[in-house]
Image: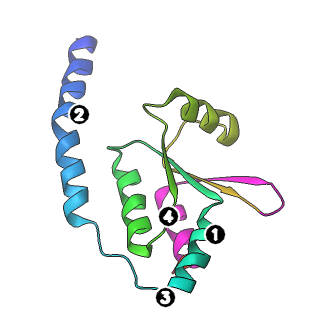
Amino acid sequence: MRILIRYFFRGLRLVLAPVMLISEKLSTPKSVERTPEEQAKVDQACQNLALYQFRTCPFCIKVRKEIARLGLNIEVRDAQLDPAHKQALLEGGGKVKVPCLRITHDDGREEWMYESDTINAWLHQQFG
C-alpha cells in the first residue's frame, strides 16, 4: 500500500510540474523600472546573493516571482537536481529546505535565510 501511495504522488508531480512552470511564466509580473545607474547598483548588490530552490516548489516560485518583480539578477541554484548545490545547502544552511537565500555579507560572513515570506520581505526591504 505504501508503495502505491508513493507512485501516486510521483505521478501527480509529473503531471503538475509542467502546469506549475507554465503558470509561473504566464503570471510573472513585469519588473520595476530603474535608471541604468540604479540598476547597476542593484546588480552589484545581487552579486552576494544566491537562491537555492527546486524548480516546481510553489514557495520557490513565489520567491522567483518577487525577484522578477523587483528586477533582481540573483543566481538561482537548483538544490534538487544538482548534488553540489544540495551539499552546499546542507553544509552552509544546516538543512536541505527550500527556498533558501544565501547572503554573503561584506565581511565574508554568510547568512542562510529560509521561508519564502521572510525572503520576500527581506528582498522588498533591500530593493523595493
Q: Which residue is mark 3?
A: 35
Q: Is residue 126 visible?
A: no
Real-space CA distance between mark 3 and mark 4, rounded to the nearest whole angstrom? 15 Å
Point 44% across, 66% down: residue: 67
Report if the CB atoms under discs 2 and 4 are less than 8 Å apart: no
Real-space CA distance between mark 4 and mark 1, rounded to the nearest whole angstrom? 9 Å
Tell me if 94 is positioned left or right of 13 in this view.
right
The 10 Å Cα crowd at callout 1, few under 14, some 14 to 19, many 20 or more, is some
Residue 123 % position (x, y): 54, 70
Which stretch is magenta? 106-125
Q: Is residue 89 above or below residue 100?
A: above
Real-space CA distance between mark 2 and mark 3, rounded to the nearest whole angstrom? 41 Å
As drawn, which residue projects farthest toward the bottom?
A: 35
Q: Which residue is mark 4?
A: 73
User: Could you tell which of marks 1 and 2 lies nearer the N-terminus?
Assistant: 2
At label 3, the amino acid type is Thr
